[in-house]
Image: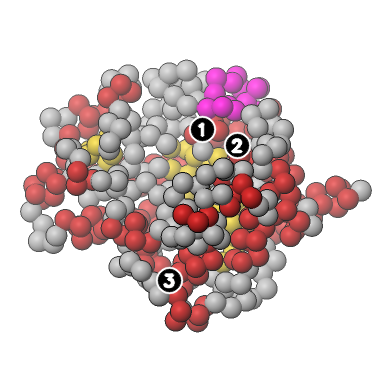
Amino acid sequence: MKRTFFFIAVIISSVLIFTLFYEKPINNIQTENIDENFEQKDNNPVEMRACWFSYLEWQIIFKDKDENEFKDKAKEVLNNLINCGLNTLIIQTRAFGDALYKSELSPASKYFTSSICEELSYDPFEIITNFAFEYHILVHAWINPLRTMSDVDFVEIPDKYTIKKWYNSENWNDYYMKDLTGKYILIPANPEVRKFIVDIASELMIKYKIAGVHIDDYFYPSNIDQLEANDAQYYEKINTNVDITTWRRESTSNLVKELYSKCHEIDSNTKFGISPQANLKNNYDVMYIDVERWLSNDGYVDYIMPQIYFGFENTYHPFEETAKQWNYITKNNTVLYAGLAVYKTGLENDSNAGAGATEWKNFKDILKRQEECLRQFKKYHGYCLYSYKSIYKPDGSKNPISQEEIDNLNSLFNI
């Protein structure tokens, strides 16, 4: 009987949020003086409770399944989300210049098919979005906009695709830079690149029942100025009158603004959101994204979802102080969600956490306390857990490592 009431409550909550969505420079912030938004927000019974489903989950759960097998696993995933009290699925559709759906613009992903050059015999994303609509689960299509693939994969994909044409071009430096692993990264300053990414978002919005378009934290690769093949050649070629770091931030902001504009042009009710790193200094100085600009001006994002993957005892980025910073800089109508690190549950050594290195091993209620902490903030309206495979095993059963942590979190919702 308790399970029946819980299921009904989740469905009612999901219908409410479903209706809402479908109605047609920072270095070190001093937190002592930023209490203006540190207050209990207005009572809002409908919050996003989401889960990321990455290309890694596609690989271990869906890869090489025939259509009927895929349908069974897709229903299993969605039922598991409901049973865990979640109402939103943020599912990857583009990981490395590829597509986890039937695309006219990008080759099929090797994380779903046997080969990157293989044509899909059915459209898995259409199936899962249709099922999600029936289950009253909101779906946000998660794309990695700039990261593509390595030489090994590029030689296999057909020449008809835009990224392959750029790869074959003598002027490939106008389109690509490389990261330390040898993967090609698209240059966001190039208007052709930005239009291509916008076209991908358009394709997803037009073809599928989605509530949002979501991009992650992969903008510029780390150590870009130490890489042999970076964007400096393109920068020098266009002969701009600003320094290269300003140019890079302007380029990523242009990409964000153009994606936002296209999403709202196609359907003003579709939400466009970004999940950056929680480290504000890294975002500005390393990833070359000006988050403060996006959150101080209209026309960039509908929601921001920083990956606050830190415990309370983290020496360098303690959870509460980091969350407080994000609440403070969210000054416009942007909705603030928090990305939470269920994947760290049971971690014996969080090596970059300083005094909090063993926190995730010592406590089983961190996510619960984080949710309680976040409820103090005016701008906060939900969370997203990274990731599905940390909550459920490939066979659909609960992951015993995180089960107690998840149960403690869900006790706040009487689940």
The residue labelled by disc 1 is 56
Residue 329 numbered mark, or none:
3
Q: Quadrant of residue 371?
A: bottom right
Residue 26 higher or lower than 112, as above or below: below
Name the secondary structure under disc 2. Answer: helix
Q: Give how far apart the Cα atoms at labels 3 and 1 are.
A: 32 Å
Q: Earlier in the sequence, mark 2 or mark 3?
A: 3
The residue type indicated by label 2 comes to Lys
Mark 1 and 2 residues: CB-CB less than 8 Å, in contact? yes
Kindly identify the amino acid type of the residue bearing the numbered disc 3. Ile
Number of residues whose C-alpha sits closer than 10 Å to that of mark 2, classed few (under 14), some (14–19) or many (20 or more): many
| Residue 347: mark | none
The answer to whether residue 94 is visible is yes
Q: Is residue 335 magenta?
A: no
Q: Main secondary structure of the magenta part?
A: helix
Q: Quadrant of residue 122?
A: top right
Mark 1 neighbour class, 10 Å CA radius: few under 14, some 14 to 19, many 20 or more: some
- Ranked by sequence position, the earlier of labels 3 and 1 is 1
Residue 289 in the figure: left or right of residue 395:
left
Residue type beneath disc 1: Leu
Q: Is residue 61 magenta?
A: yes
**Coordinates of residue 284 in the picture (x, y in percent):** 31, 60
State which region is magenta.
59-71
- Which residue ends up furthest to the front in the rendered image? 355
Sequence-earlier tag: 1 or 2: 1
Q: Residue at x 38, y 61 (%)?
A: 280
